[in-house]
Amino acid sequence: MRFLVVLSLLVLTGAQLFPFWNSGNRDRHDGYQFEYHSRSHLLVVRDTGNCYLIHADKSLVDTFVDKATRDTVEDDIIQHIKNNQGTHAESHLGSLTHFHDILTSAECVRRKIYSLDYTFGTATSSKS
């Protein structure tokens, strides 16, 4: 536990000293914050208590960066989250090891972390 506290403090300090780590795009949509971390090819989606981490391939990045299609991809991701489709619980250390993004580790402190297997346009309806 001490290791996580020390690591979090180091990350927060580093993030203050090196704000250019995350050159990407940010957006808010329906209570979720979307943030693309270009350095680690990671799309981070946060709500009040959770972080969802999505490996962002070129087609997802292109769709997310384009303002004409951004709302559509964000709606699709939110549908995945609400349907619990493709979500896998991650530990903080596991997400750091898997995604290699220190900034995300700092931003997701005190939140549950999930990796989200995502391909654009694959959300299923939860209607019965």
Image (cartoon, rainbow, N blue to C red):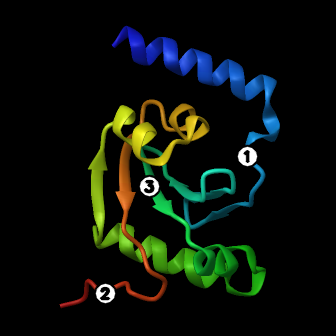
Decide: is 90 above or below 10. Answer: below
Decide: is 92 above or below 54. Answer: above
Instruction: Measuring from the top left, give residue 125's x and y in whole percent.
Output: 30, 88
Q: Identify the amino acid type marked 3.
A: Tyr
Residue at image coords 46%, 71%: 78
The secondary structure type at the circle numbered 1 is loop
Instruction: Measuring from the top left, give residue 43's x and y in whole percent.
Output: 57, 60
The secondary structure type at the circle numbered 3 is strand
The secondary structure type at the circle numbered 2 is loop
Q: Residue 91 lies in what quarter of the image?
A: top left
Label 3 environment density (alpha carbons within 10 Å; few <14, some 14–19, many ≥20): many
Residue at image coords 38%, 87%: 122
Q: Which residue is mark 1?
A: 22
How many numbered markers are drawn?
Answer: 3
Q: Nearer the viewer, residue 36 or 57?
A: 57
Residue at image coords 56%, 41%: 101
Q: Which residue is mark 3?
A: 52
Q: Which residue is mark 2?
A: 124
Which marked residue is nearer to the observer: mark 3 or mark 1?
A: 1
| Mark positioned earlier in the residue sequence (2 or 3) | 3
Residue at image coords 37%, 67%: 81
Q: Identify the amino acid type marked 1.
A: Asn
Answer with left or right where residue 123 lies relative to residue 55. Answer: left
